[in-house]
Image (cartoon, coloured by chain):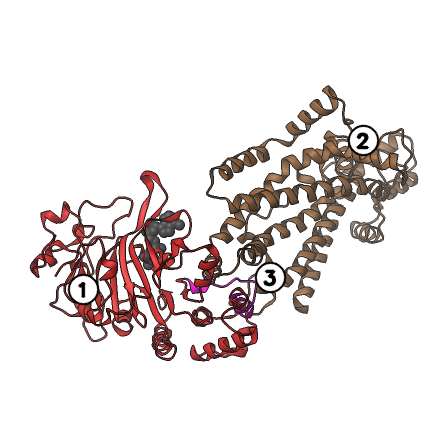
Chain colours: A red, B brown
Amino acid sequence: MSIGRGEPASGAGTSPAAGLARPILEVDNLTVTFGDGPGSVRAVDEVSLAVETGDIYAIVGESGCGKSTLAYALLDIIPPPGRVTSGEVRFKGRSLSQMSRGELNRVRAAEVAMVFQAAMNAFHPVITIGAHVDHTLQAHPEVFASRSEGREYFRYLLNLVRLRPERTWDAYESQLSGGMKQRVAIALALVLKPSVVVLDEPTTALDVLNQRLMIDILADLHRSLGVSIVFVTHDLALVAELAGRVAVMYAGRLVESGTVDEIFASGGRRHPYVTALTAAIPTVVGAVSDVRPIPGEVPNLAQLPPGCRFSPRCALAEPICQEQEPALLQDDRGHLVACHVANRLLGVPSK
Amino acid sequence: MSRYIARRVVASLAIIYIVISLSFFIVRLMPGNAVSALESQLSVQGMTTQQIDAQVNAIYAVTPKAPLWRQYFTYIGHVLEGKLGRSIINQSETVLHIIANALPWTIFIVGTSLIISFVIGIAIGSALAALQHTRAAKAVSFVVSVLSSIPNYLVAIVLLYLLADIHPIFPTGAAYSVNVTVGFNIAFIGSVIVHGVLPIAAYVITSFGVWALGMKGSAVSVLGSEYVRAAESRGLSRRRLTQTYVGRNSMLPQVTTLALSVGFMFGGSIFIETYFSYPGIGYQLDQAINSRDYSVMMGCFILITVAVVVSNFLVDLLYPLVDPRIASPGGARSVADRRAEGTKAMPVGGSTA
Ligand SMILES: Nc1ncnc2c1ncn2[C@@H]1O[C@H](COP(=O)(O)OP(=O)(O)OP(=O)(O)O)[C@@H](O)[C@H]1O
Ligand SMILES: [Mg+2]
């Protein structure tokens, strides 16, 4: 019934039914460290997860918990001074760290594409959108028979994200609104027909109407292109609406992962942080007084509390929580929780 | 676009006009002003009032007895015709002639220095940015900052002492040796080059660091920007990344600064030209200031102003071609904002160096 946190790659995202196919993207015990020596921080700390073909996978957490860093690691574009200090990311079973630069460049965008958190800043300000597309097509001549075929496909994608192709091609980023840039960034990420697209905070910078539009577009793209989607967010409403599987991060560590139903079902085995998170989101129908913000603040990654990182803010904290880092334990459905209390209440043995 | 150009033309002409007017009023209206000083000096020499007026007119291009407004318009008219008057110290020389003789030397010495320090600085700055997290780059950065903060007179003195005094390899001053005939011959050209080495070296040593640090700063900020990482995430080749995505944008502020420095170049470099007794505009300006030769000073200031304003205008004109945000309706930001964005856009060198 339980699996230790040493080898979750085989189990983390795999539901028993889908056990046959290999996950398309696996993060195995990954640690990403910024800097070295006493001032260094581990922005991603022994995180494991697995994305199946066709999944919509959400990575959730508060600001600064390492979501973007994890997303960068999926394409091996962690900005220096950050680097992978243990573990690895595998695409279709091949470790990114073992690929040559050329091989890696072929995987980037053509297999795993990324839409950046600040899509507003994701375009070179002095070249046109069309030039961005051409450069991308040029770097991956293997994808399309001809350049014009690639351009034609980009036009098709622009229609899918509800933009007018003829207006967009010759535009500079400064001529597009934030919402338009976000959608162009998505179309550009999809132009090489990747099998996975990683979106970092796809709705954060948008107003409510554009958020709605973005959700529709993403659901649409998933349906019509069959692309697997990994998205990073702190918006639980977006998760509930879009995602199939969820991983929740706290201060660099994975604290819970499972299906959307498992995460949102009240009464199930849940990490107290996730319970608090769901209580902290206002619902349209609920009264404002029902919203309970989480007391305290996110710990500084350079000065982590001993034991469980959430324990200083946790209503259920016990002495053991301040002493021992809880293990990420799995039940028979693959639902993982890292909490001494929750795991004990449900009778999951802690090792 | 044409409205943009028209606005720039009007603004440039207005600035030139204001500076010319200021130079008139400063000379004419300063307490104990230069014109009456000259008048009393000439009357001591026993000239008649008519002779004095004629002489003052020749030197300052103003007629002292006329009403002020008429003096002003006569002066403006003269300046527009290129009549800048005569030197007070050497009254047989016109200011225009002095400037015309000095300008080629200044353009040669400061222009060459500017190009060399720009090229070296950009190369070092790009390398420092590309290797920013290595120990070697940090060490080189430190050395470059130290070099660029050594006072320039110290560099000049050390160079003169080591390479002209102890080991007399290079001459201590002048633009060419008295033994050669001026003209297009090997001896003359060789002499000009030998005389140029020390001033150019001094200039380059003290100013390449400013370019290097400026380039490093803008390249590091471009390297850290989201769109470069985004381009990397699309698997673009290293060459495409460095040339189109990093290089072009980090060069923009440097090129702007270079264009402005070219404007200041016409003012010469007082530091280089006086330490190496090099007969350029900076040298003439320094002499004029020391001997209170107001008419030469005014001529130099007008030259510098016009050169700076014109080069500014050219930058404004060319910028929309390299940066679409300036010309496009969506990009309401002005060139000044773009400059401020990169690094400090202080012109390097010029008469202030
Ligand atoms: N370039 C860097 N240098 C040093 N530390 C960094 C750097 N980038 C990120 N970090 C560290 O990594 C941690 C995680 O950063 P990351 O950007 O992944 O957070 P995030 O979860 O995406 O936050 P947000 O929701 O605000 O985007 C930060 O708290 C910071 O301490
Ligand atoms: Mg982020």
Q: Is residue A274 above or below residue A313?
A: below
Q: Secondary structure at mark 2?
A: loop
Amino acid of disc 2 = Ala
User: In the rendered image, which residue does mark 3 sit on?
Assistant: B323
Q: Is residue A132 magenta?
A: yes
- Residue A34: where, in percent of width, then height? 36, 47
Q: Look at the image and give the residue range highlighted in magenta.
A: A118-136
Amino acid of disc 1 = His
**Residue plotted at (72% across, 57% down):** B13
Front residue (pair B12, A313): A313
Chain of the residue under the numbered disc 2 shown in the image:
B
| Relative side of B169 to B323, left or right | right
Of the 4 image quadrants, the one containing the N terminus of chain B is bottom right
**Residue plotted at (12% across, 61% down):** A1
Q: Is residue B283 visible?
A: yes
User: In the rendered image, which residue does mark 1 sit on?
Assistant: A335
Q: Is residue A99 above or below residue B163?
A: below
User: In the rendered image, which residue does mark 2 sit on?
Assistant: B174
Of the 4 image quadrants, the one containing the C terminus of chain B is top right
At label 1, counting other C-alpha atoms closer than 10 Å, the crowd grade (few under 14, some 14-19, many 20 or more) is many
Q: Is residue B318 magenta?
A: no
Front residue (pair B155, B241): B241
Which label lies toward us, 3 or 1?
1
**Residue plotted at (73% across, 43% down):** B111
Q: Secondary structure at mark 1?
A: loop
Amino acid of disc 3 = Asp
